[in-house]
Amino acid sequence: MPRKAVAGQISRFLDYLAVERGLAKNTLDAYGRDLARYAGYLETRGVADATRADEPTVSGFVASLSRSEYEEGKRYSPSSVARALAAVRTFHLFLLREGEASANPSEGVVRPKVPRTLPRPLSQNEIEAILAAPGDADPAGIRDRAILEALYGAGLRISELVGLDVDEVDLQEGSVKVMGKGSKERIVPLGRFAVMALESYLTRSRPALASPKSGAALFLNQRGGRLTRQGATRLLKRAATRAGLTKRVTPYTLRISFSTHLLEGGADVRLVQELPGHATLATTQIYTLVTGERLREEYFAAHPRARFSRKKGA
């Protein structure tokens, strides 16, 4: 079958990403999905070996994906197509570096134009409402409060939060040791409220939730196992609903709110790069645009001479 050779090449590439570059499982899964689509397209074009693909082939894949629907009436967004092209480029670069190919056919393919969207952080009042929503009447509520305080207080990714073990939290020092993207370790300070919430969770809630299968996991579900990404996301949605928010709130929303509020409070942009583990300063600088936009909004809303209207004939 034509696809077998390509499948083997993709498998070797994914092994390289996992072993040599140490990419996280979620990232590897994303590469795998994008390259599976690419392999399917190569099969339809009769390309039995990825090293035989040329620039028109890769361009055709990008065009085909842009026209495709992943569900009825729902097409792939430009950002999804751009991500798939990035995966294909990295894959072909791997084949080139391994000496299996003489050129990278994706090098000259134009990346789809992705509309620039600024992240939408929550206001500090909205954050306060969400953090107060769980209460402390039962072990689950105490746990939920600690999770939300840790997500916002340390700017953690959801995968980082659910991957935490008990011994990676230092309440005396007020810090948490995090394993981020690319297996990069960082130590992030915890604020006073996060420390108090975690202390309450560890003394009052986790012992009640723990079971023989809990192991070293910090955050546990109702059955005593390690809390999953989906479980943590659901509890955040419940808290947002209880807080009266109608907008969509995700763990990423708390993370971008963390970075934005630090910048608004006067933190140096390089510090804000280090704390949430941004790979590049360019990622952090997006948030400076958010704070600048918010300043403009507040200025035009509050300053008596900020807005004006032209009189007819003036």
Image (spheres, helix red, strand yellow):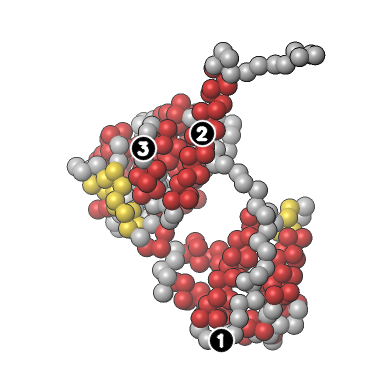
Q: In this view, does 265 lie above or below 97?
A: above
Of circles 2 and 1, the one toward us is: 2
Which residue carries the number 3 mark?
Answer: 267
Give 258 or 53, whichever is nearer the viewer: 53
Give 175 or 204, whichever is nearer the viewer: 175
> What separation in Å lies between label 2 and label 1 (alpha carbons)?
48 Å
Q: Do the residues labelled 3 and 1 touch (CB within 8 Å)?
A: no
The picture places residue 161, in percent across and down from the top left corner, at 39, 50
The picture places residue 149, in percent across and down from the top left corner, at 37, 38
Outermost residue, left side: 172
Q: Which element is circle 2 on?
A: helix
Whether residue 207 is visible here, answered yes or no, is no
**Residue located 46% across and 26% down the image:** 125
Could you tell which of marks 2 and 1 lies nearer the N-terminus? Answer: 1
Which residue carries the number 1 mark?
Answer: 100
Which residue carries the number 2 mark?
Answer: 292
Q: Quadrant of residue 61?
A: bottom right
The crowd level at tag 1 (other Cα within 10 Å; few <14, some 14-19, many 20+) is few
